[in-house]
Image: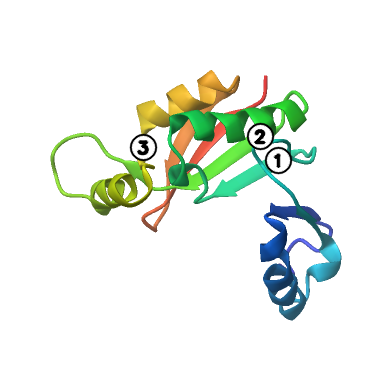
Amino acid sequence: MTATPGLRGVLFDRPEVLPGAETLLSAAGVRDRCELIGDDFFASVPGGDAYVLAYIVHDWPDAQAIGILRACHRAMAPGARLWLVEQVVPPGDAYDRAKLLDMLMLVLFGAQERTEAEYRALLEGAGFEWVSVRPTATPFSVVEAIRP
């Protein structure tokens, strides 16, 4: 956080989440660098240069996930980047925790984890240009797309 003191951001979430976020951002000493906006991401999102949706898209079936992505697409200028931080289901039959989580999300919420191909289809269906999936040292990957 101190490495990029000029960086500013917007935290966009449900209104009832923002008081807790404000407390955390204040404790981290970055509250003055972050605008908090509470609203419905199915309707619209604020404009910006880069978007990070961390562990969001997996909460929703395809139709709703595309709705969220289209709201982002409408708000973004050409060339803006979108990063999804999600567990990407690997191909094949070998065990992977993302596959177990996929089953749990389906049974409990009607949602799902997705493969690289499924993320690509969602993003392209929402008007994005596919870039890549970048694994991390954690169970999460960063799925990158660009607004053409």
Residue underneath mark 1: 50
19 left or right of 60 in image: right
Residue at image position (14%, 44%) is 94
Q: Where residue 23 sits in the image (x, y, percent)?
A: 72, 76
Residue 81 tag number: 2
Between marks 3 and 1 in the image, the one whose residue lies nearer the viewer: 3
Q: Residues within 10 Å of mark 3 (few under 14, many from 20)?
A: many
Query: Residues at badges 1 and 2 in contact (C-beta under 8 Å)?
Result: yes
Q: Where residue 128 sits in the image (x, y, percent)?
A: 59, 23
Say which label, 2 or 3, has the lower sequence index: 2
In the image, 90 versus 134, the foreground residue is 90
Q: Secondary structure at mark 3?
A: strand
Query: Residues at badges 2 and 3 in contact (C-beta under 8 Å)?
Result: no
Residue type, numbered disc 2: Arg
Residue at image position (58%, 46%) is 53
* Residue 18 picture quarter: bottom right
Residue 114 tag number: 3
In the image, 6 versus 29, the foreground residue is 29
Residue type, numbered disc 3: Arg
Give the colouring mode of the picture: rainbow
* Residue 6 picture quarter: bottom right
Q: Where residue 59 sits in the image (x, y, percent)?
A: 46, 47
Q: Secondary structure at mark 2?
A: strand
How far apart are the alpha carbons under marks 3 and 1?
A: 22 Å
Q: Where residue 2 sits in the image (x, y, percent)?
A: 74, 69
Between marks 2 and 3 in the image, the one whose residue lies nearer the viewer: 3
